[in-house]
């Protein structure tokens, strides 16, 4: 089966006008505001792989675990964010392109049923700073190579990118309001030829009756042998009651199949991202009728996390977070009401 791969696995989009965002997490030891040597090496490696760095906008999100007072956690989160901002300022990122957000507590709520080991592992996940690198939709619309990571480039794009990246940066910095397309030296036909690739899929049996159509999303992407770190998979047709974080009964079988695949594919690590639309800008999130709080995107992501965990997906492989309406796709509002899986790691095959 042939599949036309139109965009990078890192593209958070289903239409050409959407922005491109990639995320890297920097982890800190308990009560420390400087990252370790090993974390620095990983950050360097990630940063060296980025494309278009001088024209990217950067959001830094700081977290702590649930221990300590609110004031202490906010101060520690702030110092961690400043550490990362200082590092970025020394590595081709303009300070005016950096925005910062502090959250004193980690986004993964601690469950009462967790044992001591599980609790410590989740706390360690929360002692971190997330760095979001974004190429805005206006810039995306002007470029031909719509990817932010060198490792995701095709063979021909990799040959092209050194010259093309400089061309893009110069054009956008020189005429930031222009809408002119920045062409590559590769013809359209050559691009189509390089984007068309043969895909292969895993055969993971199901206990569901009737079985789910594996050619539909999100199952198709989850079964693909070409699944990559950074890929975003929208949980199509997995729906919630209006204004609530409770999944509709009709969507449970679809989640059962997602869980079957994720239980079998122990190599996949991921984050569950909740998004909403049409909210008052004065509020960070939509109102949740179940909790009577403005936390709908967060709690919808948490609901999926709980369901997958109850179906046997190991908690250490997944995290969840609500983004409110901070990552609109561009286009119809209904497209912004979504829950996605963001692939954070694919374990190498075992010999």
Image (cartoon, rainbow, N blue to C red):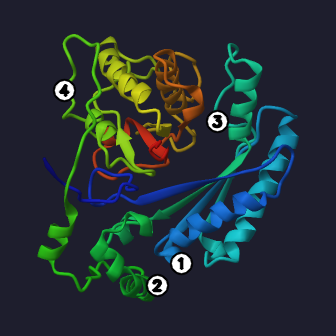
Instruction: Nearest to the eye among marks 3 and 4: give it.
Output: 4
Tell which circle, 3 or 1, labels the residue nearer the N-terminal end.
1
- Is residue 339 in view? yes
Give the crowd class for mark 1: few <14, some 14-19, many >=20 residues within 10 Å.
some
**Residue 1 drawn above or below residue 183:** above
Instruction: Nearest to the eye among marks 4 and 1: give it.
Output: 4
Q: Residue furthest front?
A: 351
Element at badge 1? Answer: helix
Tell which circle, 3 or 4, labels the residue nearer the N-terminal end.
3
Give the crowd class for mark 3: few <14, some 14-19, many >=20 residues within 10 Å.
many
Give the crowd class for mark 2: few <14, some 14-19, many >=20 residues within 10 Å.
few
Q: CA distance from mark 1 to mark 2?
A: 9 Å
Element at badge 2? Answer: helix
Query: Can you identify the residue that label 4 sits on?
Result: 213
Tell which circle, 1 or 2, labels the residue nearer the N-terminal end.
1
* Image location of residue 137, percent across then percent down: 37, 64
Instruction: Nearest to the eye among marks 1 and 2: give it.
Output: 1
Query: Which one is nearer the viewer's eye here, 248 or 149?
Result: 149
Q: Are marks 4 and 1 in contact (CB under 8 Å)?
A: no
Tell which circle, 4 or 1, labels the residue nearer the N-terminal end.
1
Query: Can you identify the residue that label 1 sits on?
Result: 54
Instruction: Nearest to the eye among marks 2 and 4: give it.
Output: 4
- The label shown at residue 107 is 3
- Residue at 83% x, 36% y is 70
- Is residue 318 in view? no
Q: CA distance from mark 4 to mark 1?
A: 43 Å
Tell which circle, 2 or 3, labels the residue nearer the N-terminal end.
3
Q: Are marks 3 and 1 in contact (CB under 8 Å)?
A: no
Q: CA distance from mark 3 to mark 4?
A: 33 Å
Query: Can you identify the residue that label 2 sits on?
Result: 173
Q: CA distance from mark 2 to mark 4?
A: 47 Å
């Amino acid at each position: 089966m042939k599949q036309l791969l139109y965009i990078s696995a890192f593209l958070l989009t289903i239409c050409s006008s959407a922005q491109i965002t990639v995320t890297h997490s920097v982890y800190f030891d308990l009560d420390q505001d400087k990252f370790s040597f090993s974390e620095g090496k990983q950050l360097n490696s990630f940063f060296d792989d980025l494309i278009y760095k001088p024209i990217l906008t950067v959001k830094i999100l700081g977290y702590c675990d649930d221990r300590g007072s609110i004031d202490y956690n906010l101060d520690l989160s702030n110092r961690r964010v400043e550490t990362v901002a200082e590092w970025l300022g020394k590595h081709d990122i303009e300070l005016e392109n950096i925005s910062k957000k502090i959250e004193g507590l980690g986004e993964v709520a601690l469950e009462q049923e967790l044992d001591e080991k599980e609790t410590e592992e989740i706390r360690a996940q929360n002692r971190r700073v997330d760095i979001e690198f974004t190429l805005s939709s206006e810039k995306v619309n002007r470029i031909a190579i719509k990817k932010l990571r060198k490792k995701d480039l095709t063979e021909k794009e990799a040959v092209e990118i050194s010259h093309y990246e400089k061309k893009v940066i110069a054009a956008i910095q020189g005429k930031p309001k222009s809408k002119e397309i920045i062409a590559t030296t590769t013809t359209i036909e050559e691009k189509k030829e390089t984007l068309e690739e043969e895909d292969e899929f895993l055969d993971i049996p199901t206990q569901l009756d009737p079985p789910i159509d594996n050619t539909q999303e999100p199952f198709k992407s989850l079964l693909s042998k070409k699944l990559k770190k950074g890929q975003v998979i929208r949980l199509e047709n997995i729906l919630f009651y209006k204004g609530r974080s409770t999944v509709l009964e009709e969507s449970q079988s679809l989640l059962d199949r997602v869980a079957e695949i994720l239980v079998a594919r122990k190599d996949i690590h991921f984050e569950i991202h909740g998004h909403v639309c049409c909210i008052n800008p004065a509020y960070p999130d939509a109102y949740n009728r179940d909790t009577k709080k403005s936390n709908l995107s967060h709690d919808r992501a948490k609901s999926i996390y709980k369901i997958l965990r109850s179906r046997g997906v190991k908690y250490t492989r997944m995290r969840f977070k609500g983004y409110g309406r901070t990552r609109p796709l561009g286009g119809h509002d209904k497209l912004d009401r979504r829950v996605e899986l963001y692939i954070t790691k694919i374990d190498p095959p075992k010999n």
